[in-house]
Amino acid sequence: MRVVALVSGQGSNLVALLEAIDGGRCAAEVVLVAADRPARAIELAAGRGIATATVPLRKGDDRAAWNHRLADAVAAARPELVVLAGFMRVLAPSFVRRFPRRIVNVHPALLPSFPGANGAADALAAGVRITGCTVHLVDEGVDTGPILAQAAVPVSQADDVMRLHKRIQRTEHRLLPAVVHAVATGALDLDGPTWRDEGALSDMPLYAPLLVR
Ligand code: GAR
């Protein structure tokens, strides 16, 4: 399955996806990594010989034109799935409509709680004792699309935002490749979205309870 990854940051989720692919745990191929700014994730992708594109959005730029440029770059790579792996821009409806039900995002909180750019910090500030991560389909809202998979992460009293976010990311690094693999194998049908095989995540310790019926 041809995957285009959109990134803005450090690229730890991208690396987790690439390692899962290399390790035979994810039946996908990342054909392009695109960013909205100069990003470490782009350097990591280029270092692995993956095609990259940076389509910067600067202050004062025309957002509609930027969305169009980015969508053109993504479409040229003929993706079967677009993965937002730490992509920190909100995509315009015009972008989302070019890849209907084929864009997934990883978010560092249990949506619909704590949407937006600071999922880990907002959960910590709210004092929840359990948070986690979500992989969801991207629709025209902000972090509002249908939820595909979630995993829980406990909050420790010793946590600060960085420590909590790092622990959430370690869980994201398992959940995101597993969901991409599920899409590639048909265990997850994005047109529902419907899990055709709910056991597809069951080799992840987090999903063991799904085996108990
Ligand atoms: C990830 O934790 C991801 O969930 C978050 O950005 C981080 C990127 O890390 N995304 C969002 O907050 C989107 N609203 P990475 O660049 O190391 O993968």
Image: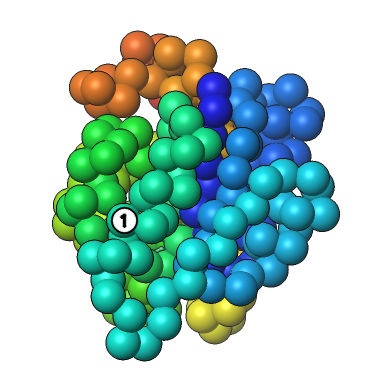
Q: Is residue 145 visible?
A: no
Q: Is residue 117 visible?
A: yes
- Locate residue 122: give its quadrant: bottom left
22 with respect to 59 (left or right): right
Foreground: 103 or 205?
103
- Quadrant for the N terminus in the image: top right
- Locate residue 211: give its quadrant: top left
32 with respect to 73 (left or right): right
Q: How many marks?
A: 1
Instruction: Pinpoint residue 167: horizontal percent, then vertical percent.
Output: 60, 62
Residue occupying the point 41% across, 56% down? 70
- Quadrant for the C terminus in the image: top left
Instruction: Pinpoint residue 15: horizontal percent, then vertical percent.
Output: 70, 50
- Up the image or down, 73 lies above or below 121; here it is above
175 with respect to 20 (left or right): left
Give the residue pinned by disc 1. 68
Residue occupying the point 56% across, 63% down? 54
Residue occupying the point 82% across, 54% down? 47
Disc 1 under 8 Å from ligand 1? The reply is no
Foreground: 105 or 64?
64
Residue occupying the point 27% across, 40% down? 98
Mark 1: secondary structure: helix
Foreground: 191 or 64?
64
Tell me the amino acid under the disc marked 1: His
| The residue positioned farthest toward the bottom in the image shown | 59
6 with respect to 49 (left or right): left
Instruction: Pinpoint residue 175: horizontal percent, then vertical percent.
Output: 53, 40
Q: How are the residues colored?
A: rainbow
